[in-house]
Amino acid sequence: MRPNRFNRPSYIEVNLDKVASNVRNIKDKLPQGTLFQAVVKSNGYGHGALETARVALENGADYLGVAFIEEGIELREAGIHSPIAVLYPEPPERSGYFVEFDLIPTISSVEFAESLNRCVPTGAKKDVYLKVDTGMSRYGPYLEELDRLAGGIGQMERLNIAGVSSNFSMSDYRDKSFSAEQLGYFHQAIEIIKGHAVSPLKISIANSGAVLDIPESYFNMVRVGLLLYGYYPSRETTESIEVRPAMRLISRVLYLRELEKGQSVGYGRSFIADRNMLLATLPIGYGDGYPRILSNKGEVLIHGQRAPIIGRICMDALMVDVSRITGVEIGDEVVLIGSQGGGYIGADELARLCDTITWEITCGLTSRLPIEYHYRDVISYKDEIKSYA
């Protein structure tokens, strides 16, 4: 948690009611019995892992997904008892933490499995998921290597092959031909692993793009990240599930100055005024994760109207032209991501201006920004979260 203890004028606001609504709408799209894994890695995509995890579980998520063991341990130590899958393989020397903190490992090597098997107490069984590479070329064995991995793990007395996962690389593209090819490989992988598993498998390849557009990829578990936080993965997916962005990035006008024609703004004098202007300075910059590449092309909202960023964005400040907005005063709220009045600037819009993806914009906001949470339906969180095992 990053409470705004000292009322910093620049902060993140997260509306957890919107997260809750997004979870329920996604859950409604899934067939009965399909498990919903809420992905809260990278600090909940910048929204706060613990807070979004709790709300997701309260509103229908069954599992949580994180990237590394540290993220899972943080949730465990905060009192989350629901199943947590670590989505990426870890080195063998870290295998003991999966036992200590009851985390589900994703395995791509016999070496890790052997190390984990030694850490499990005698007589106990540890559920593991296998990661299969179906076209990402990132983690996991190819099909021709899978039988060896699954067979080796299947013979380890303290490990239980409980699931299999893979990753789509183009599920958010209009052309689904490569996704179909991946799905074909995945079906083959499932059959190979079933030959070495003694219990029913949890089968997961569907991400946000696939949940929207590839229902045949649901199997019995889906993993949802970006959609959970209110953004569609790309302009090429459908919007078959209604979601709303939960985040606003807020600052305030800290300083106003009259700028005369011919005066320059910021480092490098990248902006020269072509007229007399009114300039507002905001106490937020690339040190907070607001991209410097938006210099001289980004916009913010003041009084619900767009104001252009002028000059280069600094580490701790940026400047905007408010000449055409009436009545701007020091202390006025400024929205850099989100809605204000009738205006709206999405993280996806910033991503397009930066030639990047929405994920990078929200995940890139740094820890020096406090986070304020709004959740009308729940005054205080439950002491313990129900286990969905």
Image (cartoon, rainbow, N blue to C red):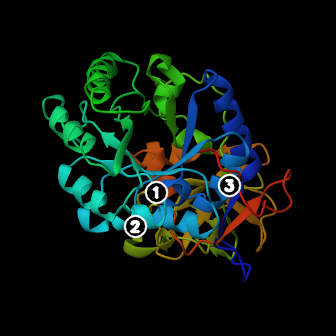
Q: Which residue is mark 2?
A: 97
Q: Is residue 44 left or right of residue 153?
A: right
Q: Is residue 102 left or right of residue 15?
A: left
Marks 3 and 1: which is nearer the front? 1
Q: Residue furthest front?
A: 123
Q: Residue at x 14, y 35 (%)?
A: 145
Q: Secondary structure at mark 2?
A: helix
Numbered badge on residue 103? 1
Q: Which residue is mark 3?
A: 54
Q: Are marks 3 and 1 in contact (CB under 8 Å)?
A: no
Check the image and report above or below for 381 versus 241.
Answer: below
Quadrant in the rendering for residue 357:
top left
Percent position (x, y) of residue 249? Answer: 64, 59
Q: Measure the alpha-carbon separation of dots 1 and 2.
A: 8 Å
Q: Are marks 1 and 2 in contact (CB under 8 Å)?
A: yes
Percent position (x, y) of residue 186? Answer: 30, 25
- Asked whether residue 383 is in view, the answer is yes
Q: Is residue 384 left or right of residue 30?
A: right
Q: Residues within 10 Å of mark 2 (few under 14, many from 20)?
A: some
First-in-chain label (3 vs 1): 3
First-in-chain label (2 vs 3): 3
Check the image and report above or below for 77 versus 33.
Answer: below
Q: Secondary structure at mark 3?
A: helix
Q: Measure the alpha-carbon separation of dots 3 and 1.
A: 17 Å
First-in-chain label (1 vs 2): 2
Q: Amino acid at mark 2?
A: Tyr
Q: Amino acid at mark 3?
A: Arg
Q: Measure the alpha-carbon separation of dots 2 and 3.
A: 22 Å
- Asked whether residue 48 is in view, the answer is no
